[in-house]
Amino acid sequence: MERLQKIMAEAGVASRRKCEELILSGKVQVNGETVTTLGTKADPAVDEITVDGKPVGAEKKMYLVFNKPKGVITSASDPQGRKIVTDYLKGITERLYPVGRLDYDTEGLLLLTNDGHFAHMLTHPKHHVPKTYHATVKGVPHGSELDKLKKGVMLEDGMTAPAEVEYHDINPEGKESTISITIHEGRNRQVRRMFDAINHPVNKLKRISFGDLFLGNLKRGSYRHLTKEEIEGLLKQVRLAGKYNKAEAPAESADSSTSSQIESLPRRTRKPKTNNWSKSSARPNSQSQDKSSVRNNKPNRPNKSDNNSSRRTNNPGRSGKSPKR
């Protein structure tokens, strides 16, 4: 069951806000009854939904991988009249949206879908889906510079998460090199800014994989449909990472769920925290101390011939032992 306005929007009736206006105006019927409440839920596979008497069908879910060329906008429209992704989707009538974005000057793998839930799973920061790029940069970064990227570098918007970095190709003349870098975040122009931070600006950037999905030999400007196995593989990767909401992840059996086994353990089997004070620690046993030294709280007079050693040992409050006489 889903909210009525969501079903209508995904079916291509209009934007979600416009669909809400249609509901409030009394133009939407569910199983022959007019609905004017925005919270109403329905099942598009079972319920008959109409707008002004015209049936609304659930839009078929579509998942594409597109090899975006450089100089293309990852958007549904562009006020400057530049090329957009949908210009390359010949024969596709469904309204598709990008899963994340690629910069205007960045090329490579871009996912497109009309499944908002699928897109949310793959792009939400807490899911940490890895994305790999080939970055052709100016010069040849030293190994120590790549180590900085591996550990994380400070950008204007904070420290980056550790990245996986390795050399991919090096120009014999040393003018430029191609570095393979895998990140688990999705900040704006992140890869370019990371290389700027080590003084090796990016000349060319190409995304070659998104999770376990690789671009392969897909021609530039071309697209293909994802297979069922590829879709399930991406979703499985999110769930196995343990980052996805448990309420929406597949239910696990009691035998295979480690977390359920831990929660089922009796509380008494969990060892309480204890203070591991040893006899020689900073908290001495008062019963083992010399009563006179505790009562008077005065150290013995040091031997002149051994002044330094007496200074280290004549304070029972530090060593936990009575001073030597």
Image: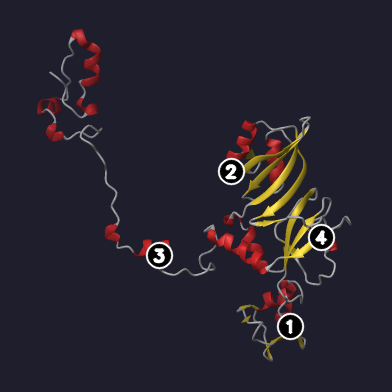
For marks 1 and 4, give the one nearer the viewer: 4
In the picture, the quarter occupied by the C terminus is: top left
User: Which callout, 4 or 2, points at the residue further toward the start of the chain?
Assistant: 2
The Cα–Cα distance between marks 1 and 4, rounded to whole angstroms, is: 31 Å
Residue at the location (23% across, 36% down)? 278
Q: Which mark is residue 162?
A: 2
Circle 2: element type: loop
Residue 260 shows which numbered tag?
3
Task: Report helix, strand or loop for mark 4.
Answer: loop
Amino acid at the residue labelled 4: Ser
The quarter of the picture where residue 115 lies is bottom right
| Percent position of residue 109, x then y | 74, 55
Read off the residue under disc 1.
56
- Vertical relation: 54 (above or below) 299: below
| Of callouts 4 and 3, the N-terminal one | 4
SS for tag 1?
Answer: strand
